[in-house]
Image (spheres, grey):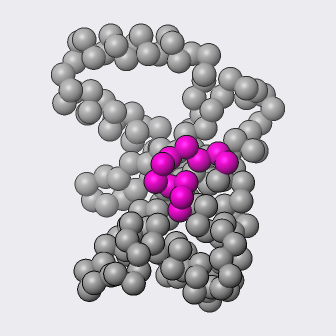
């Protein structure tokens, strides 16, 4: 429950069920979708619900867990939480998209963590109609620069785009 900052299991279950109901159909990730489905599932009891979610997260039935499985579960749960929140941010941004953006814009969640641990994240908008042109630009960059230089450019672009949130 600490991953989601919940007071109790009943309120956590109700809150998450409400938050994921419009995400399940939008999710295309083969690992995240079953997690979202388990959260929105109609388990008979809170215990059954927790077991269902924990089994999806850990990829093992909870009755076969050993001591190390608690740590694995905790780590994977934090990862699922980040991915869930990123998808939720993108979907909410799409739902609240300004009319002037039209159908040409798509939301993306971008996050950059600096060597000092400072992290900046935000929704950015891409223009679908310019994808072909930009793919050609990317191909041109890949011809001129090494993989390491492309990685450096990617990191610099991420830092530049997110400097307003840093």
Residue 150 placement (x, y as % from top left) = 27, 27
- Report the front residue among 134 and 26: 26
Residue 29 located within the stretch drawn in magenta: yes
Quadrant of residue 137 within the rendered picture: top left
Residue 28 against residue 62 in the figure, above or below: above
- Looking at this rendering, what residue extends furthest in the right direction? 99
The number of numbered discs placed on residues in the rendered structure image is 0
Where residue 43 sits in the image (x, y, percent)?
65, 77
Q: Main secondary structure of the magenta part?
A: loop
Asked whether residue 49 is in view, the answer is: yes
How far across and how far down the image is residue 95, in percent? Answer: 75, 44
Magenta residues, as a range?
Answer: 25-35
Can residue 5 be spotted in the picture? no
Nearer to me, 152 or 21: 21
Give 17 or 44, whichever is nearer the viewer.
44
Q: Which residue is drawn at 63% across and 32% down?
A: 106
Residue drawn at (55%, 39%), measured in percent from left and top? 108
Tell whether position 67 is magenta: no
The residue at 64%/45% (across/down) is: 26
- Residue 92, above or below 138: below
Q: Where is residue 85 in the image (x, y as percent from the top left)?
A: 56, 59
Left or right: 38 in relation to 74: right
Q: In this view, does 148 lie to the left or right of 93?
A: left
Above-or-below relation of 12 to 109: below
């Amino acid at each position: 429950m600490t991953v989601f900052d919940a007071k109790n299991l009943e309120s956590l279950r109700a809150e998450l069920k409400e938050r994921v109901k419009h995400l399940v159909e939008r999710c295309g990730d083969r690992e995240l979708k079953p997690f979202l489905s388990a959260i929105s599932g109609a388990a008979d009891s809170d215990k059954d619900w927790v077991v269902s979610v924990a089994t999806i997260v850990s990829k093992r039935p909870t009755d076969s867990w050993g001591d190390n499985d608690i740590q694995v579960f905790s780590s994977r749960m934090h990862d699922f939480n980040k991915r869930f929140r990123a998808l939720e941010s993108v979907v909410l941004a799409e739902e609240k998209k300004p009319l002037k953006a039209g159908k040409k814009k798509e939301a993306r969640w971008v996050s950059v963590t600096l060597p000092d641990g400072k992290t900046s994240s935000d929704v950015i908008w891409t223009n679908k109609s310019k994808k072909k042109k930009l793919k050609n630009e990317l191909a041109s960059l890949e011809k001129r620069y090494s993989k390491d230089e492309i990685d450096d450019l990617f990191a610099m672009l991420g830092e530049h785009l997110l400097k307003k949130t840093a």
